[in-house]
Amino acid sequence: SDPELCFLGPCSSWPSGGSPDGRGPPMTSRDTLEIVDGVHASTTRLALKSQLERFGEIDICHKIGDPREDTPWVRFSNCACASNALEAIGRGEVLIDGVTISAQWRVRKKEPPAIPRGREDGP
């Protein structure tokens, strides 16, 4: 894939049924990966970053404590790099401490979560 394609259009997309007017599902960021498996509390941020920066420049590598409580994520400088990293992760080519990691596109949460129907405020 051509990294320049990233700069010709937005790096975000709306899942089918979604829309840019905010009434559809949350926007999916196409430059940011959420690491959903293979990273543990003992995994360092530097270990995660060093394995992924071979795919391109990383703007932010977020990894704090236990990934079950605070999901790690990595934002690349452009979406082509993020896409290449996600493809390699999907092929099982990215390991940290000998463990294959899993990732997905990170969903940006622009709006606070909706209160489920049936819940009422107050006692």
Image (cartoon, grey):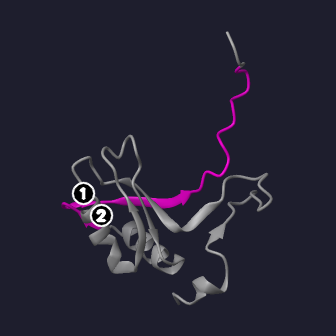
Q: In the rendered structure, which segment of residues is drawn in magenta?
A: 94-119
Establish if 10 lies above or below 73: below
Q: Residue at x 31, y 43 (%)?
A: 66
Answer with the quarter of the image where residue 101 lies.
Answer: bottom left
**Numbered disc 2: secondary structure:** helix
Image location of residue 28, percent across then percent down? 61, 61
Q: Are marks 2 and 1 in contact (CB under 8 Å)?
A: yes
Q: CA distance from mark 2 to mark 1?
A: 7 Å
**Numbered disc 1: secondary structure:** loop
Q: Residue furthest top?
A: 123
Establish if 83 lies above or below 25: below
Q: Amino acid at mark 1?
A: Thr
- Whether residue 29 appears in magenta in the rendering, the answer is no
Say whether residue 93 is visible: no
Q: What kind of secondary structure does the magenta stretch mostly adopt?
A: loop
Q: Nearer the viewer, residue 73 or 103?
A: 73
**Count of picture labels:** 2
**What label does residue 44 carry, if any?**
1
What residue does disc 2 label?
Answer: 48
Position of residue 106 in the picture relative to residue 55 (left or right): right
Image location of residue 100, percent across then percent down? 28, 61
Image location of residue 44, percent across then percent down? 24, 57
Q: Residue at x 66, y 76 (%)?
A: 10
Image location of residue 54, percent across then percent down? 32, 79
Q: Residue at x 61, y 85 (%)?
A: 7
Q: Amino acid at mark 2?
A: Leu
Dot 2 alpha-carbon crowd within 10 angstroms: few under 14, some 14 to 19, many 20 or more: many
Position of residue 119 in the picture relative to residue 23 (left or right): left
Q: Residue at x 39, y 40 (%)?
A: 69
Q: Residue furthest left?
A: 97
**What label does residue 61 carry, if any?**
none
